Image: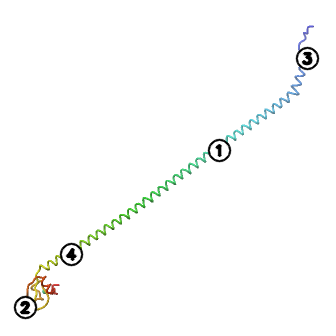
Amino acid sequence: MQNKKPFYKKWWFWLVVIVISFFTNFVFPNQNTQSTQQKNEARSAKVEKRHKQKLAAEKRKREKAEKIAIRREKAKTKRLAVKREKLKKKRLAEKRRKKQAREKAKRRRIARKKELAAERKQKKLLVAQKKTQEKQEAAAERNSRTVYIAPTSGRRYHFDPDCRGLRPANGNITKIPLKEAISEGYTLCKWED
Ligand SMILES: [Zn+2]
């Protein structure tokens, strides 16, 4: 038997339509809703995830900035310490230099003092030598000179034959070497002293 009815006139076609319609209206809508909910959930999860990622990124950024700040602070502290150390060294060097200068000045003062003392000593020696020489010269002169005495009047000797101390002798005058006059106990006339 040949069936030439169009497909929409066949009973199973409508059954199929009804079944599809049923599924579409009562089963799939739920699924669609579920799907929409899931989608929404997924979207919100995505948004949340993105938010979390953003927060994490910000946190990372903040931590990085903090790390950099700490590193900078450390570097600064180190720089300051180095600077302080340098300053300390400089001060020590300055102190040492001053001390050395003081010691040098002291040494120089002592040397100068010694020099002056030596000079004074030398001067003293020269003066003493000169005195001795003068004494010797005076003695030599005294020994080589001749003096005048008045044997009958007084115990004085005179370098000047016209001395007023010789007047009382009335020409009774003797010329003798000074050495001899001294050895005989004559002393220098008080007018010629
Ligand atoms: Zn005299």
Name the residue furthest top. Answer: 1
Mark 2, ligand 1, within 8 Å: the answer is no
- For discs 3 and 2, the disc positioned in front in the rendered view: 2
Secondary structure at numbered mark 3: helix
| N-term-proximal mark, 2 vs 4 | 4
Q: Which of 25 and 158 is in front in this view?
A: 158
The kind of residue tagged 1 is: Glu
The kind of residue tagged 2 is: Asn
Secondary structure at numbered mark 2: loop
Q: Nearer the viewer, residue 2 or 84?
A: 84
Q: Is residue 14 left or right of residue 133?
A: right
Q: In this view, does 87 lie to the left or right of 146?
A: right
Up the image or down, 52 lies above or below 110; here it is above
- For discs 4 and 3, the disc positioned in front in the rendered view: 4
The residues tagged by marks 4 and 1 sit, at their Cα atoms, a distance apart of: 101 Å
Location of mark 3 (residue): 12
Q: Which residue is drawn at 11% across and 92% down?
A: 153
- For discs 1 and 3, the disc positioned in front in the rendered view: 1
Location of mark 2 (residue): 170
The residues tagged by marks 4 and 3 sit, at their Cα atoms, a distance apart of: 170 Å
Q: Position of residue 138 (x, y in %)?
A: 16, 78
Location of mark 4 (residue): 132
Up the image or down, 29 lies above or below 6; here it is below
Task: Report the disc number at residue 63.
Answer: 1
Name the residue furthest front. Answer: 183
| N-term-proximal mark, 1 vs 2 | 1
Q: Which residue is drawn at 48% across and 55% down?
A: 89
Name the residue furthest left. Answer: 171
